[in-house]
Image (tube, helix red, strand yellow):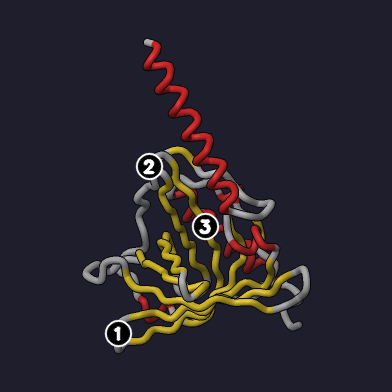
Amino acid sequence: MYLKIIEQGRLRRILAAVLCLFSLLVQGEAFNWPHWGRCKNLPVEQDFNVYDYMSYWYQQAGYNTEDIQYNLRCVHALYQFDSSNNVVSVDNMAIRNIDNKHQGINGTAVLADPSKDEGRLVVTFHPYWWFTVKGNYWVLGTDYQSYSVVYSCSNFFFFFHYDSIWYLSREQNFPPRTEALYFNATNSVLIANGLDPSILKRTSQQNCNV
């Protein structure tokens, strides 16, 4: 019994140390603690057409996304497909609110399983020459012409997962009626997957011509 108490104490200390380490690795006021359990294998868009998905997408809302953590606006991305090697080039761009400076990061994306026609991709970025970041890019739903709902999830330390959600649109800004239709469509995708749309925060697409 005494040994069992010691082992339980060790486990609590290890978990506390792990969580403290993780909190130091992620910066920003909008940091959310990882959730208990492993990532769910959510269903994604089937018969995914990578060609129709290319070109510009503008972020309208997000959860655990870079714009929230680092106070960015005008977040958007350009996707371009290279048919010679079946790789998508990814150019992410934004403006920092603190000084109005433009910043961006480039990467690549490939289908997670080329034998399946589904919206499940793996994105790779190289923020530094010695450091590579890979992440899941799951298209939960899209009509290719107006909206896309993207989900990403990573497992940590066997016990936790950390996820992010993006609402993307083809238009940078839209009139009120179109905006209502847009959020009805994107929210419906999350609800269908058991996710709560209220956790997302809007991304500003104003004052982008600076």
Question: Which amino acid type is marked by label 3?
Answer: Ile
Dot in front, 2 or 1: 2
Q: Earlier in the sequence, mark 1 or mark 3?
A: 1
Q: Earlier in the sequence, mark 2 or mark 3?
A: 2
Q: Where 14 sits versus 188, above or below?
A: above
Q: Which mark is residue 165?
A: 3
Dot in front, 2 or 3: 2
Quarter of image, res 173: bottom right
Of helix, strand and loop, which one carries label 1? loop
Where is residue 136 drawn, in percent x and y? 40, 61
Direction from residue 12 to residue 93 in the image, left or right:
right
Q: How much space separates mark 2 and mark 3, taking CA atoms? A: 21 Å
Find out whether the residues at labels 2 and 1 contact each other: C-beta distance under 8 Å: no
Find out whether the residues at labels 2 and 3 contact each other: C-beta distance under 8 Å: no
Where is residue 40 drawn, in percent x and y? 37, 47
Direction from residue 27 to residue 55 in the image, left or right:
left
| Residue at 34%, 70% in the rendered image | 48
| Residue at 31%, 66% in the rendered image | 112
Where is residue 198 drawn, in percent x and y? 61, 48
The quarter of the picture where the C terminus appears is bottom right
Residue topped by disc 1: 85
Where is residue 35 drawn, in percent x and y? 49, 41
Q: Earlier in the sequence, mark 2 or mark 1?
A: 1
| Residue at 47%, 62% in the rendered image | 150
Question: Which amino acid type is marked by label 2?
Answer: Phe
Find out whether the residues at labels 1 and 3 contact each other: C-beta distance under 8 Å: no
| Residue at 43%, 19% in the rendered image | 6
Q: How much space separates mark 2 and mark 1, taking CA atoms? A: 34 Å
Residue topped by disc 2: 158
Q: How much space separates mark 1 and mark 3, taking CA atoms? A: 28 Å
Of helix, strand and loop, which one carries label 2? loop
